[in-house]
Amino acid sequence: SNVFNKKEFVSNVKDNLKNLYRKTLDEANQQEIFQAVSTTVKDEIMDRWLATQQTFEKDDPKTVYYMSMEFLMGRALGNNLINLCAYKEVKEALEELGLDLSVIEDQEPDPALGNGGLGRLAACFMDSLATLGYAAYGCGIRYRYGMFKQKISDGFQVEVPDNWLKDGYPFELRRPEYCYEVRFGGNVRPEYGEDGSMKFVHENYQSVLAIPYDMPIVGYDNNVVDTLITWDAQAKEVFELDSFDKGNYEQAVAQENLARNLVEVLYPNDNHVAGKELRLKQQYFFVSASIQRALARFKKHHDDIHDLPEKVVFQMNDTHPTVAVAELMRILVDEEGLGWDDAWNITTHCVAYTNHTIMSEALEKWPIEIFQRLLPRVYQIVDEINRRFLIEIENRYPGNEYKKQKMAILWDGQVKMAHLAIAAGFSVNGVAKLHTEILMNQELKDFYDMYPQKFNNKTNGITQRRFLAHANPLLADWVTKHVGKGWITDLSQVAKLAPYAEDPKEQQEFMEIKRKNKIRLAKYIKEHNGIEVNPDSIFDVQVKRLHEYKRQLLNILHVMYLYNQLKSNPNMDFYPRTFIFGAKAAAGYRNAKLTIKLINNVAEVINHDPDIQGKIKVVFIEDYRVSNAEWIFAAADVSEQISTASKEASGTGNMKFMLNGALTLGTMDGANVEMYDEVGADNIFIFGMSAEEVIAHEQHKDYNPMEIYNNDPDIHKVLNQLIDGTFSANDKELFRDLYNSLLSNQGGKIADRYFILADFRSYANEQQKINSYYRNRKAWAKSAILNVAHVGKFSSDRTIQEYVDDIWHLDKITVKMDR
Ligand code: 26Y
């Protein structure tokens, strides 16, 4: 059944061009055509969105509110067409007009309302929720500026503002009729009634209005359209148009400033707390508005607030929305008039928490001073939660002051958000098996001992609709040819590919598809970097946020090492290799930015050295983001997942590479461990220390990188090249900080805290194995196909079904459309 009739589609696009721009097809530019095409597609989505809402009204299903500061959605047009099953017909319809759908897709800015893994996971989850037919709202912030655009200038990262809304975004719907007030600052005063009752009055506060913008989340081929709510802020006075009486003028200006600042920009820090007051404001802003909207929806169907847990669950994506615990309590106690125990019982059956990291620098702790000044009533509630929590600890561990210190929500002048999330959440989950084990046995052991029943694992996943069906149409068709279309909604069906792994004809076809994707990426690299790369070389790729624990530095040091080897032995056994990097560094993260500069300088030297005859190329892809990621995964041979074991909670890029038939070179970290279990030791390259070994070294403080430096001449040489001008002829000192970070303790940071030198040799050995293995094209193709065949577990559909079964207990809905 065709979603669009081609003739009608074309005529609708033309109509939309006329209505939007008063232009004909000949006069319109590609951006305008993108808008007109998107409007046409949105029209089709609207019918399903309406029908879905009507189903919600009729069936009143239990609903999950996925609360997240970040939703890294990526472009919507292509994805919506895939999920409407209309991609091919629209592509053809546009071709008849002489238009190229991929050029039109390329006009869309990436909605990049997120940093990296955590934000992209939220986006994959929304796709799976809609596809599986569950009632779900994503709740987030409509940042005016998303993740910055990255320019590389003289090898350095330069951050450019991401004005993604400048041409207007076609896939959002402003809904001012569902606005809510959110209050900041002021003071709380007890007010006594004549009957001796007491309530708290919040006064002298500043308020803003939260205005929701809805984005449709289109399920695959099922008429379900869920909603991502992103909240915009507006000054109340301006909104109500009545404030400019003189007395209120200053107040009005202050509120306008507050509203503008609140949603101005996404904090570009990934896994590293900056502790900015404005961020806490952002958190409370979207959390308060989202809870108000959820309760309003609930009340349309129910009069007894005690039934809330039967119909509503709030999933907190890391601690960022954890103020939800206290905000829900506040509303239940102050506005619904419930007693504390009643309110606590409801709250603790409605909120659940996902932990995404064990890195201590990513744990959110707010100074009490800030928290109390900004959210005086909410703070009182946190204080009371803490008081009762400490009593609970005392009852469980009488006289154990140490436990209380370690587990308190308020301690040392700080509000510890993770402790609040665990004390209140009915579920606490990690994002991969190893990660959850580390949480239970180390990081959160005290909490696990007290509440073992709360802890559970939900290994992350990714959506195969974006990362295979859309990203890699050639491979998608090949998979469909062999196993049918079922994989699009049930990825476990790719297991049926396994028998083809041994078939020489299929191996060849597979490798030809990979080669075409490499040519597509090579063209992109040529256009964007001006670098010529050889599609017959091994594409060895590391794309992810730049962070020391992810060890891009290990990768580039190894490239330097290989370069040295090739220089001194030009005829050594070496298969041509293209090392591809893509990464954004947080704007204030010095070592991360320096690593980007190092990669670019190494590229500059190696790419222009005739001695090595083009055998190594190094490419840093500018502005790595969801849209170019799709092309990069499709073209990769080797997937670098080389974090220090125990540091990467899960990783999800690892799964996207696997889905596209790349072989993983990785540590036993995060979900790599489970990928190893699925694909088997013969089809993955594992190196380095185990998580246990890393943790033991951290505890015993017995690691000495200097020893390795002194005893391994190759490593010695590479490190010296950081400070002898080999890659920074004009400024030998440029990379001194990287050198120092590996060899000396400084400012509380211990030398090589991510064990780069410790893992270097075993990394180089595995790289050598890859070199030989790739020469055996059949073996390589077999392993690559087996990677695709064993990726089934890593669909976010599987992950979401587990959340539903174990945590959310949602009802499945079916949306009927009479067409
Ligand atoms: C508190 C603030 C500074 C902060 C902001 C963003 C803290 C953390 C983050 C982002 C964390 C993040 O992206 N974590 C990643 O989550 C992925 C999805 O679960 C994991 O796959 C990945 O291993 C983890 O690093």
Image: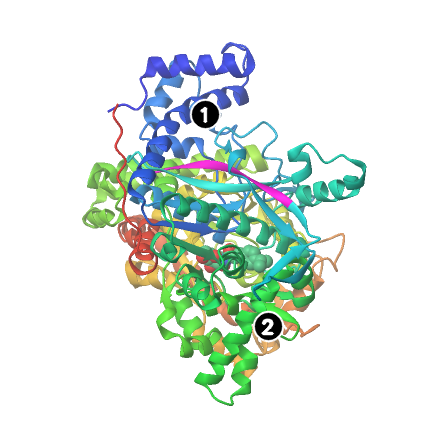
In this rendering, would 243 be left or right of 191?
Answer: right
In this rendering, would 416 be left or right of 465?
Answer: right
Quadrant of the rendering where the C terminus is positioned? top left
In this orientation, which residue lies closer to the viewer: 366 or 484? 366
Quadrant of the rendering where the N terminus is positioned? top left
* Tag 2 and tag 1, C-beta contact below 8 Å: no
Residue 446 rendering spot, x and y as whole percentages: 46, 78
Disc marking residue 18: none
Q: Residues within 10 Å of mark 1 (few under 14, many from 20)?
A: many
Q: Secondary structure at mark 2?
A: strand
Distance from Cα at disc 2 to Cα at disc 1: 49 Å
Outermost front residue: 194
Disc marking residue 38: 1
Label 2 beta carbon within 8 A of ligand 1: no
The amino acid marked with disc number 2 is: Leu
- Residue beneath disc 2: 410
Q: Which residues are magenta?
A: 208-219
In this orientation, which residue lies closer to the viewer: 80 or 571? 80
Outermost right residue: 246
In this rendering, would 412 be left or right of 783?
Answer: right
